[in-house]
């Protein structure tokens, strides 16, 4: 058995692609539009052949999807937890759980999907402003 993908419903494709591709660094691997079904599927991955995230955009969805805490979160190993948090913050993303420990942070996508970022390998040395930044909201 091989894990293939997780699906997320999104309302704003551009905002979602900005978050997942421009800010987090994922790459669009393929896309499928269905005129008959009135939806678009966009697959993203960290690299070719890696497990994917399937963004599903239902064209006629006027309201935000309700968030189910039973989903949990997506998690990504990152090369530099501080650098990616700086990039996300510069892109307008709130760091909900800052990497005070040099190891873990949480943010949310434009559709309120919780995303965990984990430092690959050992935690980085403790560093401001992250060390004294409080957590905010839910993740």
Image: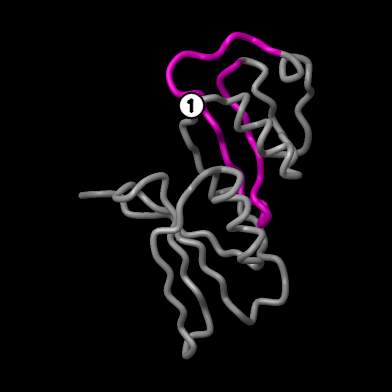
Labels in figure, total: 1
Query: As drawn, which residue projects farthest toward the top?
Result: 125
Q: Residue at x 46, y 83 (%)?
A: 34
Image coordinates for residue 42, horizontal then vertical, percent: 47, 65
Magenta region includes residue 80: no
The residue shown at (71%, 76%) is 62
Structure colour scheme:
one colour
Crowd rating for badge 1 (residues with CA inside 10 Å; few <14, some 14–19, many 20+): few
Q: Residue furthest bottom?
A: 36
Image coordinates of residue 86 in percent, x first then y, are 68, 31
Residue at image position (47%, 90%) is: 36
* Left-right relation of 129 to 26: right
Q: Quadrant of residue 64?
A: bottom right
Q: Quadrant of residue 117?
A: top right
Left or right position of 9 against 98? left
Across and down, in percent, residue 105 comes to 62, 29
| Outermost left residue | 1
Residue 95 versus residue 66 in the image, above or below:
above
Q: Residue at x 63, y 34 (%)?
A: 106
Quadrant showing the C terminus? top right
- Quickly name the residue at label 1: 79
Q: On the picture, is 117 further left or further right than 65?
A: left
- 106 versus 130 height, above or below: below
Residue 88 rendering spot, x and y as whole percentages? 67, 39
Where, by quadrant of the figure, is residue 18 drawn?
A: bottom right
> What is the span of residues highlighted in magenta in the rendered image?
102-127
């Amino acid at each position: 058995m091989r894990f293939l993908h997780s699906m997320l419903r999104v309302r704003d494709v551009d905002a979602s692609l900005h978050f997942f591709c421009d800010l987090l660094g994922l790459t669009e691997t393929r896309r499928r539009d269905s005129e008959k079904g009135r939806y678009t599927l966009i697959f993203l991955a960290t690299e070719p052949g890696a497990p994917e995230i399937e963004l599903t955009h239902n064209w006629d969805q006027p309201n935000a999807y309700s968030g189910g805490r039973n989903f949990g979160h997506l998690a990504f190993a990152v090369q530099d937890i501080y650098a990616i948090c700086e990039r996300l913050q510069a892109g307008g993303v709130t760091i909900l759980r800052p990497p005070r420990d040099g190891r873990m942070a949480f943010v949310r996508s434009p559709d309120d999907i919780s995303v965990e970022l984990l430092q690959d390998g050992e935690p980085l040395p403790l560093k401001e402003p992250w060390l004294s930044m409080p957590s905010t909201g839910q993740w």
